[in-house]
Structures are given as C-alpha cells and as structure tokens.
Image (spheres, helix red, strand yellow):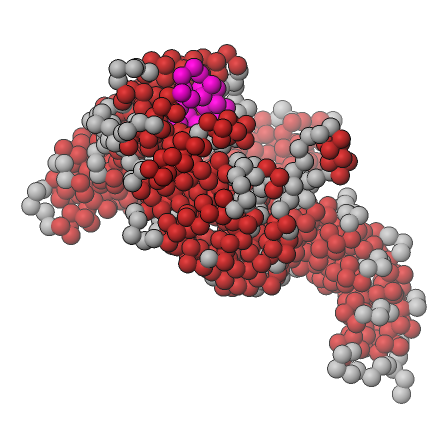
C-alpha cells in the first residue's frame, strides 16, 4: 500500500512540476520519500526534488538531493548534471567541472554537456588568472609602499588599493597567505603616519568576520604593540587602531553575526583567554602616563562598548565582574584627574565623562546586591584612601572622583556623599585660596545637587559659599561654574511652580547673566558651554524660558554653538535640554483630581503648573523658535558624530522635533529647512523612547507632506520602518492614527514604496486596525489598504483561502460613515479590477453583497457612487453567469436611471461608468437598446 501511494505521490509531483508549481511538487516528492524503501524510486524522487530546488534557486538543497540520488546510483546522469548546475551556482566550479566531466564520459555526443564543460573550463581558468593576478598585485603594492623613493601619488593609490583588498574576503585571504601580515608590520615600523594608517586599516578589513584570521593576526602583531600604537597623539591613527581592536573583538566573540562555513566553521578556537588579555591591556592603558589623551579615550570607548552586557536577559556578566575586580580602581583614577594639577595624566575634554559613563554601565550591569555592595566598597576604600591632611592634591583628587561618580551611577554617588568627611571636604575646598581647589569643589556641588532632597541640604549649607565665591573670584571659569551651581540649585524644584527655591525674580537674574555670557563671543567656547548648561537648568522656570525665546541674539548664539560640532558631548546635551524645556516636551505626570484632593487632605505637596506653561504660551514659544532657525540647528546636531551625540541627546532632540511638528501649519516650514531628513536617523537609532518620539514626528510630517519633497531620493524608503513600528498596540491611539495616515500617503506614491511597506510586515497590523471600534483608526487603516490593494502581494493575500479579508472590506462598504465607505469601496474596486476570482469570491463571502453594492451605486456622494459603479462593472466583466444574476436584480434599474442622467462636469465619470455597465450587458445579449 505504501509503495503504491509513494508512486501516486510521485506522479502528482510530476504534474505539479509541469504546471510550474514547484513548492507543491517538492511537497509531493518529500511525502513519497517517507513512504518508500525502493532504491530505484528513491533515486528518482531525490533527482526530481533536486530539479525543484534548481527552479526555486535553493541550490544547497538541490546539490544535497542530487548527491543522495548519486549515492544510490553512481551512473545517474540526470542527477550528476543537476548537481553540477547547483554546484556552479554555489561557486564550487571545480566540483561542478568533475560532475559534468563524468556526464560527458557517459554521453560523449551530448552537446549540452560539451558546452557546459567548455564554459566551466573557461570560468575556472579566469578564476585562477584573477587569483594569481591578485597575488602579483599584492606583491606590487607592498613593493611600492616599502620603497622610500616611491612617488606620493603612487604611494597613496597603493595604500588605498591595499585597504580595499583587505575588506574583500578573497583579497584578505591572499594578503594573509602571501606573508602580508609581516609586510604590514614593516609598514608600521616606517613610523610614517599615512603608511601606518594604511597598514592598520588593512588589518581591520582582514580581521572582520574571520575568527581564525583575527586570532592569528592578534598573536602575530601582539596586543602590546597594538595598544602602544593606540597610545599615540595622532587622533586618526588612535581611531584606526581602535577600529582594528573592535574588529578583532567582534570576530573573537562572534559579535560580527557572520555565518562561518567550511574550514572556518570546523575550527574550534578558545577565544576567552585572548579577550581577557585585550581587556587587561586596555585597563592598563587607562593609568599609563605614556598614553595620550586620544588613546585613553579610545581605550575607554572599547571598554564601554564591549564589557557590559548588551542584553540584560543574558545571565553571564563575568566580563563586568573581571573589570570591577581588576580595573575599577584604574577607572576611578581617571575620573579623579584634575587637569590643573601637575600630576594629571594626559586627557581630552571627554576623558573623564567617558570614564563616568563606563562606571555607570558597569554598575548597571551588576545582578545582585552583594555585587553592588562590593562595587561600593571598592569606591569607598579608594576615596577614603585619598584623604590626607598633609597632601591637598590627594583630597582634591578624592572630591573629583566623587564628582565623576555623581555623573555616572547617581545613587552610588549619593551614598558616597554621605560618607564621613566628604561634604566637609567639599565645603573646605570652596574656601580654599587655590583656584584649582575651588573649581573642583564647585563642580562637585553642581553634580551633587541633581536631586531635590540633596539640593535642599546644599541650599542650607552651600549656597552662601557659592555666592561668596561668585562675588570674590576674578577667574571667569570659576565664576561661570559657580553661576551654574546656583542655576542648578534654583531649578531643583523642576517645573513645579510651588517649589521655587529662590526668591521671586532671582532665577531671571541668573538667566540674564547666562544669556549675557552666551552672547559674548570673546569668551572661550568651553566657558560659554557652562552658560548653556546654566540655561538648561533655569529654563525649567516658565518665566525664564519665555524671556529666553524672545532674546533672538541669545537663541542664535546657542544655535551657533550647537552647529560648531565641537568634540564636547555636553554642549549638544545642554542645548537639547534647553530646547526640551522651552517646548515643554518633557514627560509630565497626569494629575488625577481625586489624588490631588487626597494629597491636600493629608497636607502633602501638590505640584502646581506655572501660568506660562499652558498650551497658548508653549505654541507661541514654538513659533518663535522656528522663526529663529531652530530646525537648521537641530539638523546640524543630528549630523554630529555618534561619540558626541549620545542616545540620551538623540532622545531629547526627538522630543523637540515632535513638539515642533505638532501644528500642521508649521510642518511645511520644517520640511523646507530639512527637518524631515534630520528626523530619520533619530527614528532608527537611540533609546526606545527617542525612536518612538522621532517616528511619531516622521508620521506627522509624512501624513501631510509630499514625500518626494520631505524625504528626497532613497531616504523615503527609510521612513517606512519607523512608521510601521508605531502600529503597535502598546503605542497610543494618536500615534497609531498618524502612522496610518503617513503610510497611506507613502503607499499612494509608488509600487516600490508599497512593496517596502509589505516587506516590513505592516499588512497584518493594518488589517487589525480595520477591525478597530475607533472610527478614525478604522477609517485610516481602510484608506491605507485602499492604496495598498494595487500591490500584487497584497492581492494574493485576498486571493488566499481560509481568511475573511475580502468579507471585511465588503462589510465596511455597507457602513454609515461616508469616508469609511469611500475607502472600502476604493479597495474593493481595485481588487475586483485586478482578479476575476475575487469578483466571484465577493459574492460568496456574505449574503448582503448585492444589497451593499446597490447602496453604493445609489450613494449621495459622487466619489462613493463612482466606486460602486466600477465594482459593478468589474463583476459584470468577470463572468457571464454573475452578470446574468446582476441583470436579474434591481441593479439593472439603478444602472439605467444613472445612465440616463445628463453628464454635467461633476457627474461625468459616474454617468460614463453606468453607461459602460449597460454596454457590457448589451454585449452579453441580456438587454437590447431601445430605438
């Protein structure tokens, strides 16, 4: 019985194959293979399934099936030839040549075999020629690079060619096999920056995605040499070496996500020892005086990227534990550096901030309280070990370390502030005669006063000190930092009008001084940056932000600072924070009236809204910001390097953009200044909240703008994914609605965009919203489906059996909402025009189809009526029996009445379509013209 069924399934498979339904044929052959043990039949089935694999371009599967057929019958000429074809597509030309050679031996007169043999022979010769020419090119390049007398143009060209070759798998392998690593080391020994750069970049390409090669290069070049090269003052070389180490780490840890095949897959390499060695050397770099500021930054960047877990659901945090045990004291030493002291390590403006970020990431990566307690104890021991009554420099380092930790894990910093002697030392340093001590103490007070509870303590203890320093110091750097400390303390109550810390008008005076410094271009950029930071705190006060947006010179001075693309992260963050405050785009907790009453009853503080934080004032501020050119500043900020533009800053920028896009009338101006393009990268990278906010801003723009202008060129395709991400049930109704409007607009532009929307798997979500009870969401989803219905893949979803998609569209045509009817009728008109099968299916999905169609054809709105008549025409054209059924119903009378109307300008399309329906009926002979 089983053998008979297998034979029958084989025949079914053959029939499917003849009809070019290769999936069904594969399924039949696979079922037959499970039922039979007859070797002859097994060979035929495997051979036939290999033919299906070739047709469906599943070449690996086709080669495997053909091999199984050959295992049963080594002289199976069809299986041999099919395996040859599959292997050729897989690039295994030598193996394919052997198979077709056997075929030609078995059937020497077969012209097809002879032709394939000739073609493969030519291809193999060409491959060998390229391989040997690559070897000679590599040799020539190294000769030019290692020759001291080579011309500059030739040298540059050879270096660039070598880098390009190193990025290609075949080229990288040829360099490696030709003693290329040794020659690259010779290039490094020349100490010429351009040659060192070329060597390092070539090695980066060779290490990418190849574990065995990366391991060999690491052992040959040696981690000590790589780190010493990264310690250089040359910023470009330090960055290139950082990229090389990142490529090695990615390959060793498997982070490159590349599939390893063949020999590479067979190698089992224990990379943990190498990765630990790299981490150990990077930690040693942090405290070495021989390392430049650039090199230290790159070491911190590598540790930041590779030590903490990227996904907290992964249990193993051993890398973090290793760094805490062996390197936390070294990181704390970097955080505690004071640039004005002679013992300071070489630093850049970003070094201490990067170290604070690393401490924060390590602390967040700890899994339990004992691990966090161990972390805290190391910090406490390090800080208390620095306190020395005889050595003021050590005390300054201790407070600077606390200040750095406060910029990282704030809760840990708060615990350290509570240690005996820390606050007293901060106060003592404020009163020191040395300016370096005052500078450190003031910055520590600024970072300590981030939370209201801590700020309250400092207001009672530290404000008088800050004021005293502000009045007495002549050093501008200290003066402006003191001012920022006062600004921060003054804004500790946040946007709560009832928690103002200073007397009425004091914050406005502080803000006025900050604006004055900001506009003074004679002051250096770093000092002006502190003025922006002061405003970032003070603009939580509605009076301050209202004054600030009216001060056009101050606004434009801030925008120019943001556009300058300095290497300082905090400028961008402070500017973004100030704009968030001015546009009120921060999160505000919803006030529940019942809870307010309860708070009043229990004599608890109730947050108050400032009168100038109401919507009218916010809208006015947005208008002024747009007029001052905020969009061009934001567009410049978005283009900043990722090392400067942190994810938190991106989130703030996304919030500002969303607030600016709120009024549809402003969106045209935003698009004209490049706001649409600037939003795209914010929607693709950053924090989850930031990406959602940016995607919402994109949706607002895409809903009302011409996509060709808002997102020119290929950028428009990048907009689709963020919009689709908003079609999530976790997003609010407004985000869903505006995303659907944006997708509707995009899907109306071109089939390529419709294809992109389909590939992003938006269809199931759009269909879900068509079932929504919310009228506007349902209408928007149906309008989107109306545009998507032109796409072939979408039509195939409607053609598929076992779903109610078509039924839903037909029933939506019968709803009372005119806009919903219009959209649903449009979708149905598109679908019935595309496939006759859908015309027949429409009559089967619901018994109400004819009544709904008649209502559409009699609709008051001409656009709905026209779509209804187009559906009627499609049904009449699809099938003679269906046409007869329609003619026998009241539809003929409706068509006659509409067709006899006088076609004025508005009704021309409706009357014309009705007449075409009647002509179709005459063609069938169901009605005759009246003379």
Quadrant of the image occupied by residue 573: top left
Pinpoint residue 193: horizontal percent, then vertical percent.
17, 40
Q: In the picture, which quadrant includes the N terminus?
A: top right
Which residue is depicted at the point 37% across and 21% down?
A: 425
Q: Is residue 400 visible?
A: yes
**Considering depth in this image, is 554 or 489 the residue closer to the camera?**
489
Which residue is depicted at the point 77% across and 47% down?
A: 772
Please name the predominant secondary structure of the magenta segment in the image. helix
Which residue is depicted at the point 86% across and 81% down?
A: 900
Pinpoint residue 275: horizontal percent, then vertical percent.
35, 21
Q: Is residue 199 visible?
A: no
Pinpoint residue 608: horizontal percent, then vertical percent.
65, 41
Residue 414 in the magenta stretch? The answer is yes
Q: In the picture, which quadrant includes the C terminus?
A: bottom right
Name above or below for residue 430 compared with residue 845. above
What range is drawn magenta here? 401-424
């Amino acid at each position: 019985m089983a053998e008979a069924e297998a034979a029958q399934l084989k025949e079914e498979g053959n029939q499917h194959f003849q009809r070019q339904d290769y999936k069904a044929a594969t399924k039949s052959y696979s079922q037959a293979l499970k039922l039979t043990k007859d070797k002859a039949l097994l060979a035929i089935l495997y051979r036939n399934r290999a033919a299906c694999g070739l047709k469906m371009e599943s070449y690996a599967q086709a080669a495997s099936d053909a091999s199984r057929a050959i295992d049963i019958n080594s002289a199976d000429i069809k299986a041999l030839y099919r395996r040859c074809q599959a292997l050729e597509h897989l690039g295994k030309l030598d193996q394919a040549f052997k198979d077709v050679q056997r075929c030609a031996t078995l059937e020497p007169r077969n012209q097809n075999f002879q032709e394939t043999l000739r073609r493969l022979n030519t291809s193999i010769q060409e491959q060998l020629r390229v391989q040997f020419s690559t070897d000679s090119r590599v040799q020539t390049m190294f000769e030019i690079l290692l020759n001291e007398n080579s011309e500059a143009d030739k040298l540059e060209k050879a270096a660039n060619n070598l880098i390009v070759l190193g990025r290609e798998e075949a080229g990288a392998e040829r360099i490696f096999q030709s003693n290329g690593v040794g020659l690259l080391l010779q290039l490094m020994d020349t100490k010429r920056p351009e040659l060192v750069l070329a060597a390092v970049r070539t090695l980066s390409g060779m290490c990418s995605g190849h574990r065995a090669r990366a391991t060999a290069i690491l052992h040959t070049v040696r981690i000590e040499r790589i780190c010493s090269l990264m310690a250089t003052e040359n910023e470009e070389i330090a960055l290139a070496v950082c990229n090389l180490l990142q490529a090695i780490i990615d390959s060793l840890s498997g982070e490159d996500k590349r599939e390893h095949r063949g020999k590479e897959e067979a190698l089992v390499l224990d990379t943990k020892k190498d990765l630990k060695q790299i981490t150990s050397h990077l930690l040693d770099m942090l405290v070495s005086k021989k390392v430049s500021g650039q090199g230290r930054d790159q070491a911190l960047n590598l540790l930041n990227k590779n030590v903490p877990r990227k996904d907290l659901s992964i249990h193993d945090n051993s890398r973090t534990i290793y760094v805490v045990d062996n390197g936390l004291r070294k990181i704390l030493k970097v955080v505690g550096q004071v640039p004005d002291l002679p013992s300071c390590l070489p630093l850049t403006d970003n070094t201490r901030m990067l170290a604070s970020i690393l401490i924060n990431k390590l602390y967040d990566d700890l899994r339990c309280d004992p691990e966090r307690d161990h972390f805290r104890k190391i910090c406490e021991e390090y800080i208390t070990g620095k306190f020395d009554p005889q050595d003021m420099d050590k005390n300054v380092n201790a407070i600077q370390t606390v200040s750095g930790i406060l910029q990282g894990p704030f809760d840990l910093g708060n615990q350290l502030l509570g240690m005996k002697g820390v606050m007293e030392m901060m106060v003592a340093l404020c009163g020191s005669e040395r300016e370096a001590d005052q500078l450190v103490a003031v910055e520590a007070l600024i970072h300590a006063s981030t939370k209201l509870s801590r700020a309250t303590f400092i207001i009672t203890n530290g404000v008088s000190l800050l004021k005293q320093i502000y009045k007495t110091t002549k050093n501008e750097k200290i003066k402006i930092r003191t001012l920022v400390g006062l600004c921060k303390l003054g804004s500790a109550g946040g946007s709560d009008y009832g928690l103002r810390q200073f007397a009425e008008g004091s914050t406005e005076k502080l803000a006025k001084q900050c604006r004055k410094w900001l506009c003074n271009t004679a002051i250096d950029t770093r000092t002006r940056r502190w003025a922006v930071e002061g405003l970032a705190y003070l603009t939580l006060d509605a009076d301050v932000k209202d004054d600030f947006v009216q001060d056009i010179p101050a606004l434009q001075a801030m925008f120019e600072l943001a556009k300058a693309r300095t290497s300082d992260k905090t400028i961008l963050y402070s500017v973004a924070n100030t704009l968030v405050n001015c546009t009120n785009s921060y999160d505000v907790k919803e006030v529940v009236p019942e809870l307010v009453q309860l708070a009043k009853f229990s004599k608890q503080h109730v947050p108050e809204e400032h009168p100038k934080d109401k919507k009218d004032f916010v809208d006015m501020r947005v208008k002024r910001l747009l007029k001052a050119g905020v969009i061009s500043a934001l567009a410049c900020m978005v283009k900043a390097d990722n090392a400067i533009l942190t994810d938190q800053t991106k989130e703030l920028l996304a919030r500002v953009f969303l607030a600016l896009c709120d009024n549809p009338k402003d969106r045209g101006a935003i698009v004209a200044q490049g706001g649409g393009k600037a939003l795209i990268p914010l929607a693709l990278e950053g924090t989850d909240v930031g990406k959602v906010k940016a995607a919402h801003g994109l949706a607002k723009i895409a809903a009302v703008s011409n996509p060709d202008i808002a997102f020119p060129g290929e950028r428009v395709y990048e907009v689709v994914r963020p919009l689709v991400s908003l079609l999530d049930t976790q997003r609010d109704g407004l985000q869903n609605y505006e995303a659907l409007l944006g997708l509707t607009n995009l899907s109306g532009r071109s089939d390529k965009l419709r294809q992109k929307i389909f590939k992003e798997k938006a269809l199931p979500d759009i269909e879900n919203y068509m079932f929504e009870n919310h009228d506007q969401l349902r209408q928007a989803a149906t309008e989107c489906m109306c545009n998507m219905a032109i796409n072939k893949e979408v039509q195939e979803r409607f053609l598929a059996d076992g779903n109610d998609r078509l039924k839903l569209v037909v029933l939506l045509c019968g709803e009372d909402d005119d806009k919903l009817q219009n959209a649903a009728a449009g979708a149905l008109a598109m679908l019935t025009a595309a496939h006759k099968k859908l015309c027949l299916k429409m009559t089967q999905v619901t018994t109400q189809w004819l009544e709904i169609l008649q209502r559409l054809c009699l609709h008051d709105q001409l656009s709905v009526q026209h779509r209804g008549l187009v559906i009627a025409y499609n049904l009449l054209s699809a099938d003679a029996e269906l046409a007869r059924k329609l003619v026998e119903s009241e539809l003929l009378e409706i068509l006659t009445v509409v067709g006899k109307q006088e076609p004025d300008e508005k009704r021309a399309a409706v009357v014309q379509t009705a007449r075409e329906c009647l002509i179709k009926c005459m063609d069938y002979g169901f009605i005759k013209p009246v003379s």
